[in-house]
Image: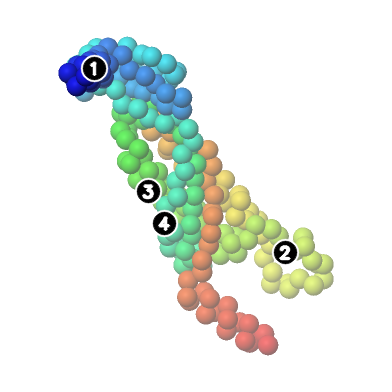
Amino acid sequence: MKPYKGILITIVVIFVLLFLLGPYFIVEEGEQAIVIRFGKMIRTETETGLKIRMPLVDQVRYYPKKIQSLDGDAKLYPTKENRYIRVDITARWKIQDPRLFYERIGDMASAHMSLDEEISAIARSVIAAHSLREVVRNSNLINEIKRKDVSPNYEPIKKGRVKLSAEMLKAAATITREYGITLIDVGIRQITFSHAITRKAYQQMIKAD
């Protein structure tokens, strides 16, 4: 019985090796692949199924088709008044052009790093051009209460958080398109005030009392 078992295992191993090193490869659901020959990409495979390659010569690299999330660390950004706030920005993206993605980025780790750098730079630029109130708020207080109760010094919100996020998306999408990446959305998930801003707000509350 043991000799037959050993022969069976050998046959299975041979078949597995022939498949792995042979002319076929499989693109699963939710995947896309590129075929590389001698370091140069020769074609893309974006449909699922059994595909053909040149054994021992062609290499296959797989990329996800599904939407990816970018959740980097919160970073400090200065507002127009030079007040620093810690902003947590999130984004969703997907690989639209695997050929361009391979040529410009290469792999998923590099993609996350590049996206984080590009979006952070754009977020810094957008936030620095707007006041703290524009970045933090998303509604116009003057539309929520009676006009007579509003201080004459009150400055209405012109854009707000959602529109600023849309600005970031528009600017970043132009850049990521060159990487073969479609940026689906960019959003300000959370804002944390620096100690200086928190302390100033507390002092203003004390004076108001």
Q: Residues within 10 Å of mark 1 (few under 14, many from 20)?
A: few
Dot in front, 1 or 2: 1
Residue 73: give its label: 4
Dot in front, 3 or 1: 1
Residue, far left: 3
Whether tag 4 and tag 3 are in contact, CB under 8 A, the answer is no
State the image coordinates of residue 205 (x, y, percent, origin top left). Answer: 63, 82
Q: Is residue 40 visible?
A: no
Under mark 1, the amino acid is Leu
Under mark 3, the amino acid is Glu
Under mark 4, the amino acid is Asp
Locate the N terminus by quadrant. Answer: top left
Residue 117: give its label: 3
Q: Which tag, 1 or 2, sits closer to the chain's start?
A: 1
Whether tag 1 and tag 2 are in contact, CB under 8 A, the answer is no
- Which residue is disc 2 drawn over? 141
Asked which quadrant contains residue 139, the reply is bottom right
Under mark 2, the amino acid is Leu
Judge by depth and name the residue closer to the eye, 5 or 105: 5
Judge by depth and name the residue closer to the eye, 58 or 192: 58
State the image coordinates of residue 108 (x, y, percent, origin top left). Answer: 35, 38
Q: Is residue 39 visible?
A: yes
Q: Is residue 4 left or right of residue 132?
A: left
Asked which quadrant contains residue 14, the reply is top left
Disc 1, SS? helix
**Looking at the image, which residue is at 48% across and 57% down?**
88
Q: Find the distance from the CA under tag 3 to the CA under tag 1.
A: 53 Å
Q: Find the distance from the CA under tag 1 to the CA under tag 2.
A: 76 Å
Q: Residues within 10 Å of mark 2 (few under 14, many from 20)?
A: some
**Looking at the image, which residue is at 65% across and 57% down?**
138
Disc 2, SS? helix
